[in-house]
Each structure stands twice: as C-alpha cells, then as structure tokens.
C-alpha cells in the first residue's frame, strides 16, 4: 500500500472557467490520498485585453478562503506534480513555461472542458487534446461524436482512445435539482459574438416586457468576452427598472440557484443549468451547431424563433404551464445522474498512479 500522496496541481487564471476545477479541488482536498495545490497565474496580456472586466481571479480566491500558490515564472518541477490539470485548451493563454509541451516533460496532463460541451466537435482544440494524458468527457453521446469527428484522421484515433474517459463533468457536480418550481425569476444569457447572438433581436423587447410585468424579474448575465453592439444601450435603458438587473459576480452557481427560468442563446450555460430541472427558453438561431447531446437535451427546452413566441412562452410559464417538466427529469436521469464525475476522475488517477508505482 502506497503511503506517498498523489500530487495534483490545478492551473487557474479566470474565475469563470474555474467552477469544475474548484469542485475537483475540494474533492481532492477532502481525500487523504491526494495532495492538491492551485497554481494561480496572471492572464497573458494579449488575452486579458479581450475581457470586459479586470477583476483579478486571485482576489476572488482570497474572498473564498481558497489557498493558492502565485505563479512567479519558470517550471513547476519543484512541486513534483504527478498530475497537472489545465483549465482551457488554448496554449496562447498560458505563460511559455506552462505550455503543455513543457509541463508534459515532468508530469501527466489532465483536461476536461471548461464548459459542459453542447456543441458539435468542430470547435475542439485537437492539437492541445492530443497531448493530454487524460481527457475526461461529459457523456457517451459526446464521446461518440468526438470519435466520429476523428474518422478523417484515423492515425490519431488510437491515441485519443487511449487517453479519453467518460466520467461526467465536475462542473455540474454541485448543481442542485429543484423539484418544486416557481416561474418568477428569469435569467438571460445572450451569446457574446454578435454573429451568433440573438441579443439585438430581443434586448428591447425583454426590456419592455419586464417593465410592463413588475411581478416577474429578469437578471441578465453577459459573457466576459461580450461584443454585442447594443449592450451599453440596454444597460442605460434598464437603469431605472427595479425588476431588471445585471448579474456581475464572476461565479454563477448562486445565479443558477436564484433563477426559476433561463433564457439563453446556444451556450454551455444551457448544459450546466439543465440539471437544475428548471425550464429553459432557447433562442433559436440559424448559426447553431449542436452535437448529439445538445440535440437530445433540446427536447426538454422551449424553442423560440421570434418575439411573439418568446412572449407566449414566458406568459405560459408565468401561469405554471410547463409541459416539458417531466421530459427534463428523464433527460437529467439519463445524462447527469448516471455519472459521479468527481469520484470517477479520482478513481482513474488512483488506478493510474498505482500502476506506475
């Protein structure tokens, strides 16, 4: 029996991509088998300029009393890591010494998506993922889509098969299912890219609708990369609205808890909100690119194509008309409750560590 602890490092820079890693951190922290540390590094300047805020992730960690090591440069060999978790699959976001090719020389690399994947596989950063040792995946449908996408490059399929594991996603491990539903507090998460966002179509309509219906509330949460042209106009228009607000906190677990209904463009937020069991109004767009999993949970959402359909759906939900409630429950049982991601990832690493010893 090994007495040495398994040494895990978690790289983090942005609070927005940290929720799943935070859940994993606390799970490892409570397990005597693991020694876990968070390595906080500052975002590369050219990447930071794209963000709509300048809130330091380190300040948020301190508020939550989460211990971390501030990265000052150089490699991480001095910490003797067995496994290093990456938060995003984009090497451009990391200091050169934390590039995956450098760290892989002295540690095994672990990765799961920074958002629960709902897309087809065109968006995968394959160059990064082919170099990880453990790619933890959301569910069987996404796993199958991923390898169907790889059929064009059969030489790499065996590499990816060896390193890919269906575990469920740590990001939703702390999401609570709500049995008794209300339909009062609505959330809205428009896409950040004007080319794929329906923000311009709905922002004025939603402002007027909620202004007329003071018995319900709207809380809008913008993506940190938001580029929607009329965002400032919307913010100005709602300054005096008591029942419309902007959710500015970097963490959105409490945001989910306080919502009764989510209105959203195509986003990983949909897949992360879905296990609450609460209704989702999906703003349809010609630019969507759903994978098999996304198409399945779409069966549990209210799809709207225009302002009238949006108004009718909101009104139905206000009147407790929610015919998809049972459909959502069945989909949650099938795709979320089937997996225990924190336990699954932990057991995979323990097994691998014992084999190499």
Image (cartoon, rainbow, N blue to C red):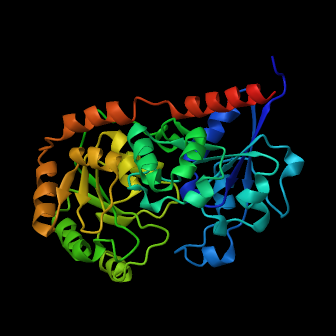
Above or below: residue 192 compared with residue 100: below
Camera-side residue: 266 or 154? 154
Q: Residue at x 78, y 40 (%)?
A: 82
Residue 89 in the image: state x and y as whole percent. Answer: 59, 59
Tell me what residue is drawn at x 36 percent, y 40 percent: 275
Image coords of residue 113 (percent x, y): 52, 51
Report the quarter where the N terminus lies: top right
Instruction: Using the image, determine if residue 309 lies above or below residue 199.
Output: above
With 312 as the anchor, is 82 left or right in this view? Answer: right
> In the rendering, at what x and y percent does residue 5 appear?
80, 30
Q: Nearer the viewer, residue 75 or 239?
A: 75
- Name the spot of residue 189 as percent of width and height, x first: 35, 62
104 and 42: which is toward the camera: 104
Left/right of residue 22 with respect to residue 247 in the rendered view: right
Residue at horizontal 66 percent and vertical 65 percent from the top: 91
Position of residue 47 in the picture relative to residue 180 (left or right)? right
* Residue 267 falls in image quadrant: bottom left
The quadrant holding residue 194 is: bottom left
């Amino acid at each position: 029996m090994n007495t040495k602890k398994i040494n895990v490092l978690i790289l983090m820079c942005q609070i927005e991509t940290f929720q799943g890693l935070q859940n994993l951190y606390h799970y490892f922290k409570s397990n005597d088998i693991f020694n876990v540390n968070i390595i906080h590094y500052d975002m590369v300047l050219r990447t930071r300029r794209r963000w709509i805020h300048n809130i330091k992730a380190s300040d948020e960690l301190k508020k939550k009393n989460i211990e971390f090591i501030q990265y000052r440069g150089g490699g991480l060999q001095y910490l003797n890591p067995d496994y290093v978790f990456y938060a995003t699959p984009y090497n451009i976001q990391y200091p050169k010494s934390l590039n995956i090719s450098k760290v892989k020389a002295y540690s095994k690399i672990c990765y799961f998506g920074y958002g629960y994947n709902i897309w087809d596989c065109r968006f995968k950063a394959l160059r990064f993922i082919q170099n990880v040792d453990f790619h933890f995946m959301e569910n069987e449908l996404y796993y199958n889509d991923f390898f169907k996408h790889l059929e064009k490059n059969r030489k790499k399929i065996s590499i990816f098969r060896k390193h890919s594991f269906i575990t469920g996603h740590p990001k939703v491990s702390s999401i609570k299912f709500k049995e008794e539903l209300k339909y009062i507090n609505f959330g809205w998460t428009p896409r950040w890219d004007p080319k794929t966002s329906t923000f311009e179509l709905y922002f004025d309509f939603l402002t007027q609708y909620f202004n007329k219906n003071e018995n319900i509330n709207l809380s809008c949460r913008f993506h940190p990369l938001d580029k929607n042209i009329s965002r400032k106009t919307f913010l100005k228009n709602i300054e005096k609205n008591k029942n419309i607000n902007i959710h500015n906190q970097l963490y959105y677990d409490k945001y989910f808890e306080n919502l009764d209904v989510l209105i959203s463009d195509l986003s990983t937020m949909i897949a992360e909100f879905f296990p609450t069991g609460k209704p989702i109004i999906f703003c349809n767009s010609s630019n969507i690119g759903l994978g098999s999993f996304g198409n399945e949970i779409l069966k549990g959402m209210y799809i709207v194509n225009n302002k009238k359909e949006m108004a009718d759906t909101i009104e139905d939900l206000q009147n407790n008309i929610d015919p998809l409630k049972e459909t959502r429950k069945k989909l949650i049982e099938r795709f979320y409750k089937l997996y225990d991601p924190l336990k699954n990832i932990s057991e995979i690493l323990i097994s691998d560590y014992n084999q190499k010893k």
